Amino acid sequence: AYEMCGRDWSSDVCSSDLFHYFLFERLTGDLVGCCGLSEVEPSGAWNLGYWVRKQSEGRGYASEAAHAVLARARQTGAIAKVEIRMLMSNDASQRIAIKSGGRYEGVRDDVIQLQGRNWPALIYVHDFST
């Protein structure tokens, strides 16, 4: 299991700050990844991102962290929509989006900037407005 460390952002949720959490292996204290939420559009949609070190992949860190961050986002009452965006070839991220309860919304062109190019992205959504 892991431990999430980061600033408590619940009181700052309306200020459009970035909210990032580091994930540490509980037994060793090693950094295994991070998970964060940032506002991406004036419409109020937020983006959930996660990253796990290559040697720590496949152990459920990103999935567990995504669940925890989404639960905190829902608790604030100030976030109506969270999107999870990934490259179309990123099967691991797609599995995490599905496990977290994200609803597939479709593909958007030119959403992800990587290596000096814009790439299409798969979009999964959590709607907290209902």
Image (cartoon, rainbow, N blue to C red):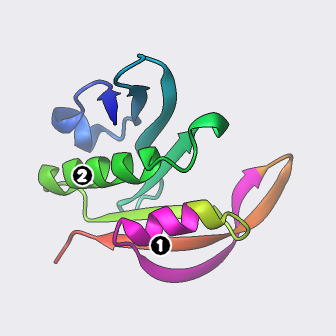
Residue 64: image tag = none
Location of residue 123 (image quadrant):
bottom right
Locate residue 62, reporting x and y percent. 45, 48
Which mark is drawn over residue 73? 2
Q: Which residue lies most toward the front here?
A: 27
Q: Residue at x 41, y 36 (%)?
A: 18
Q: Is residue 91 left or right of residue 114?
A: left
Instruction: Please tell me how many numbered marks the rendered image carries.
Output: 2
Q: What residue is shown with label 1?
A: 124
Please, what secondary structure does the residue beneath circle 1 have? strand
Percent position of residue 6, x then y: 32, 25
Residue 126 visible in the picture? yes
Whether residue 30 is situated above or below residue 106 in the rendered picture: above
- In this rendering, is residue 34 above or below 99? above
Q: Which residues are magenta?
A: 93-113
- Badge 1, how many Cα within 10 Å: few under 14, some, many 20+? many
At label 2, which amino acid type do we have? Ala
Q: Is residue 79 left or right of residue 49?
A: left
Magenta stretch: residue 109 in it?
Answer: yes
Residue type, label 1: Tyr
From mark 1 to mark 2, how far is it between C-alphas? Answer: 16 Å
Image point 16% across, 78% down: which residue? 130
